Amino acid sequence: MAQTDEFGEELADFVRRVAELKAARSVPADDLPTVLDAAIFELDHVAGQLWPWYESLSSTGPSGVASVDRQEQQLLKALFQRVPVPVALVDRETVVRRLNFAATSFTGVRAGYATGRPLTGFLAHADRAAFRSQAAAVARGEGDRSLTVHLQQQPAVPVRATLTALRPSGEPRTAVLVVLQPADSRVPSPERVPGPVPTLTETTRHAALMDLVDAMTTALLSGPVGDPSGVLERAAGVLHGRFADWVVADVAGAARLSRTTVLAPSDSVEEARCVAAQDPAACPLVVEAARGGSTALPVRPEDPDAFGRDTSGAPVLVRANVTSLLCVPLTTSPGPVQGVLTLFRSGARRAFSMAEAQAMDMMSRHLSLAMSAPDRT
C-alpha cells in the first residue's frame, strides 16, 4: 500500500508540472524551445520511470491504479496535442503515428491524412534520404540528431528538424519524436503571421480540383451502385484526360485482383492493350496498396519495375514515359480494400501535387462507398 501511495504522490507531482507547462504556452516565441525541452523531459520521465513503476504495481494485484493510468494517458495525449510547437511521432521508417495541432498548421497537412504515411513524403526530395538516415540512427539509440530540411509545399523556407528517441509504453521498438521549427527558431503564430495570399495559378488549380470532385460526385450519384467494375469504369472516365494521362483500375476479388479498366492516351493503343493484359499481382505498387491500404505518390519513380512489366516484357513505367503517378487503394476505414486505382502522368505534364493526392484520397472513399453499396436497380 505504501508503494501505491508513493506512486500516487509522484503522479500528482507530474500532473502539477504538466499544468505549469500548459500555462507556459503564452511565453514569447523565442522561449518556446525551453518549454519544449521541459515537455520532452517529462515525457521521458513517464516512459522511463512512471510506466515501469505502474507495471510493477499492477503485476502484484489490483490497486486502483488502472483508472489513474487512464487519466494519465489522456493527460499525455492532451499535452502532446496542445504543445505549442510542431511535433510528430514517427517510427524508424519515418511513418507518422501522431501529429499534433501545431504540426498540422505548420506543415499544412491534416493529421488524418499524414498518419500512416512517411513524414519524408512531405519533405523536399533532396532532404528525404538524409532525414530517413538520421531517423534510423536515432531509433537505433545513437543519440539525438538535428538537421535542416525543406517542406515540399514551401521549398524555399528552411526548417530545423530535431529528432529524439522515445520508447512508447508496452511497445518493443523505439519511436522517434520529431520537432519542426523554422530555421530562425521562431514558430509563426497564425494570429500574428498571415498566410500567403494564393496566386492566380494556385487559385485556378484549386478551382479545377473542385470541378473534378464535383464531376466525380455527379458520376457516382447518377449511375448504379454496387457494381464495382461499373463504378470504376465511370470514375476512370471522369479522371482520364483532365486529371491523368493513364487510368488503370483493379478490383479485389475473393481470390485475387483483376484488371477491369485501362484508359490511355489516344496514341498509346498498343501499350494500353498490353497493360490491360497484365496480371495486377505482378505490379508491386498495386499489391502493396491492396495489402497496406496506403496511397503511393512517387515522382519520377526510381524503380522502373515498380508497376511491373507488360505482356511484351517492357517495364510499364518506361514504356508509358511515366513521370508521376498516384496509386490509391479503394477502402473505407475500417474495411477491406475493394480495389486499387492507379493514375499516370507522362511527358512534360506537371507532377501530381500533395493537394491533388489529398483530393484523390477523398474521392477514393466515395468510390469505395459506391462500390460496396447495395444495388438499387
Image: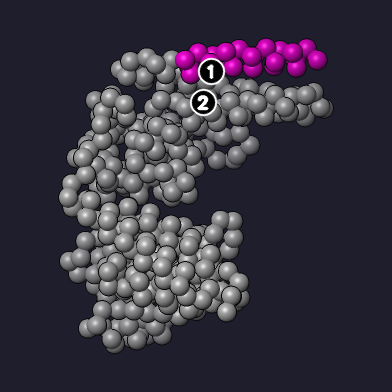
Q: Which residues are magenta?
A: 1-23
- At a point 31% along the width and 45% down the height, the residue shown is 123
In the rendered image, residue 87, in percent from the top left (x then y), is placed at 42, 32
For label 1, the residue is 18
State the SS at label 2.
helix
Whether residue 317 is visible, yes or no, is: no
Q: 111 or 311: nearer the eye?
A: 111
The answer to whether mark 1 and mark 2 are in CB contact below 8 A is yes
Q: Is residue 36 above or below residue 353?
A: above
User: What color scheme is it?
Assistant: one colour
Question: Could you tell me which residue is drawn at 47 percent across and 69 percent down?
Answer: 221
Along the viewing direction, whichever of 376 and 263 lies nearer the viewer = 376
Q: Which residue is at a point 53% across and 73% down the rendered structure image?
A: 225
Q: Is residue 334 above or below residue 235?
A: above
Q: Residue at x 27, y 59 (%)?
A: 208
Q: Nearer the viewer, residue 369 or 283?
A: 369
Pointer 2: what residue?
79
Q: Which percent across, then down, holds residue 308?
A: 38, 74
Q: Quadrant of the C terminus?
A: bottom right
The reply, left or right, for residue 46 in relation to residue 234 is right
